[in-house]
Image (tube, rainbow, N blue to C red):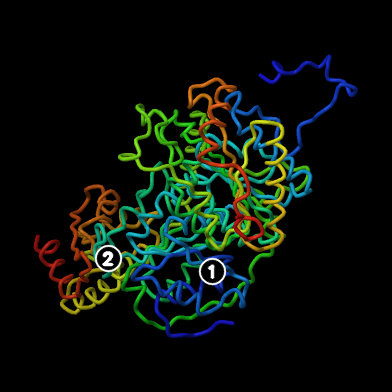
Amino acid sequence: MAETFDRPEIRTPENLVYSKTKVLTDNIMHYCPGCGHGTTHRLLAEVIEEMGIQSETIGIAPVGCSVLAYNYFDVDMQEAAHGRAPAVATAVKRLFPNKFVFTYQGDGDLAAIGTAETIHACNRGENITIIFVNNGIYGMTGGQMAPTTLPGMPTATSPYGREVATMGNPLKITELIAQLPGTYFVTRQSVHTPANVRKAKKAIRQAIENQKLNRGLSFVEVVSNCNSGWKLTPVKANKWMEENMFPFYPLGDIKVNGELVK
Amino acid sequence: MKELKLMKGNEAVAEAAIRAGADAYFGYPITPQSEVLEYLMAERPYERTGMVVLQAESEVAAINMVYGGAACGKKVITSSSSPGISLKMEGISYIAGAELPCVILNVVRGGPGLGTIQPSQSDYFQATKGGGHGDYRLLVLAPASVQEMADHVKLGFDLAFKYRNPVMILSDGVIGQMMEKVELFEQMPRLTDEEVAANYPWATTGKPAGVPHRIITSLELDSSKQEKHNHHLQEKYRKMQENEVMYEAIHTDDAEYLIVAFGSSARISQKAIDMARAKGIKVGMIRPITLFPYPSEIINKLADQVKGILTVEMNAGQMIEDVRLAVNGKVKVEHFGRFGGMIPNPEEVVKALEQKIIGG
């Protein structure tokens, strides 16, 4: 399949304006075209390369769309059970306090089945980085309702829209964990425009750098789209995200240097 | 240096973990095994050897911490009791699938459900036949004394790393809570990070330059590869059956009748055997020390010699299935058990032998 994308005749040094970070493997990603996972992977991998910590980084993959993240990051990786990545990462960091440890999790993994592990790892102030991709839906299993699905939003298991009275409210877990004394840096970003990509990368860099300080957990939420789950084109999905997701999940820093942003 | 101490079984496990050079313990309190975590917290093993001890938010988190630590090539141990072990089963299945070494202590209490806090052996099926999902086996050790509680920690780590497989120490509330004399083995050094990286090239210790990254996972979406992985696991379990069977044979040379019992039941049965022999009944015992792999061969052999076999278990009849498979119909096999937290006494065992095997 690789040759489909390869045009050796134009692959010349003078045409080279960008190259993939070596911290991403050559495996072709399974993510849908237009999905934010690929960009988020790239940013994290670029940060790891720029910090020169490829051999000192251990990543934990979740269950969900990014279950195969271990095939894409060229660092030592562990695949956790659904929702348990923060517990797994806790042990890795406690046993290798000088290594850089991250989890990469979706909303079902982190904010539903793994709520307890998320909250307690944050509350203990584990010196790890959590990258949390929130697209308001269960992508991999086929578009079911997530803990972060917006009120009224249709999904495979809320076909007439999420009815808050019977299905409960969307969980703003990022605001929740920002209240815990164990978190040091909590921010919400997106990767749907070049400007947002630059901001998100800066946040991820900060979140990894913070591990050197030993002051607690750094948490980067990336509000993302799921064009296949939302049943929209990538362009329409991004527009829908801006109009619906961002008002409910506003972008920006929530906690910096251990202090809540007013 | 070696040391002679009077200890509870649970405390002996904790002390043995430190001395075996364990890198970490992750656990959650539950009766009747909380002394393991209590002892470790009081003992400050971090200052003695650098061993990490952490009270997790749940048994689920604790077993996943074990997964993370074991995936780094570290020596990791956890402990719990029956309801807590049920919670750990998801993680245990992942650990078995990802082929990670670790030691899991189950100080069994009566069930089902919340059951009772009193001793039982009713988790035999769960420990030896699966428990979690998928085709996997734990290597299961069954201590019958405080001494073996300590020794099985060291043995458990050796076997876990030899096979890259989780090892369960299947104890019970009697052995966990009772105090006995125990000779503690000498302190072994913890491996350095460099030694771990050199000894366990499969472990996620941080990818060295020029080496492919290591992936610890139990996922394989390609069914033909997953089947191949399962064949590999089965081959490993077959090797355990070939090489690791352990049992104790007591008075079997002249035995006309045989008792098969493990753990506390074996201790009680030993007294029953003395009483029966005083009455002229020639009875011997096989005490399985490994429950998987099971000592089927010796039991099959003795079935040619004895007139009947009684299994004594603190459950409604679980190990008897393995004994019957081993005996394959050659002689009568019956079960005597007390359960729900009740402990049999030797008189009951002798009576059951007379009524179910000799008279029956």
Q: Quadrant of residue A42?
A: top right
Bin the neighbour count of mark 2 within 10 Å (Cα to Cα): few under 14, some 14-19, many 20 and up: many
Which quadrant does the C terminus of chain A fall into? bottom right
Q: For mark 2, give the secondary structure.
A: loop
Q: Quadrant of residue B256?
A: bottom left
Q: Amino acid at mark 2?
A: Ser
Q: Position of residue A255 (x, y in %)?
A: 61, 55
Q: Chain of mark 1?
A: B
Q: What is the residue that sits farthest to the front in this orientation? A: A262
Mark closest to the chain's N terminus, 2 or 1? 1
According to the image, label 1 marks what residue?
B53
According to the image, label 2 marks what residue?
B120
In this view, A59 is above or below A5: below
Give residue B171's mark: none
Bin the neighbour count of mark 1 within 10 Å (Cα to Cα): few under 14, some 14-19, many 20 and up: many
Identify the residue at horizontal 31%, vertical 73% (top origin): B174
Q: Nearer the viewer, residue B265 or A201?
A: A201
Q: Chain of mark 2?
A: B
C-alpha gap between disc 2 and disc 1: 28 Å
A163 with respect to B347 (left or right): right
Q: Amino acid at mark 1?
A: Val
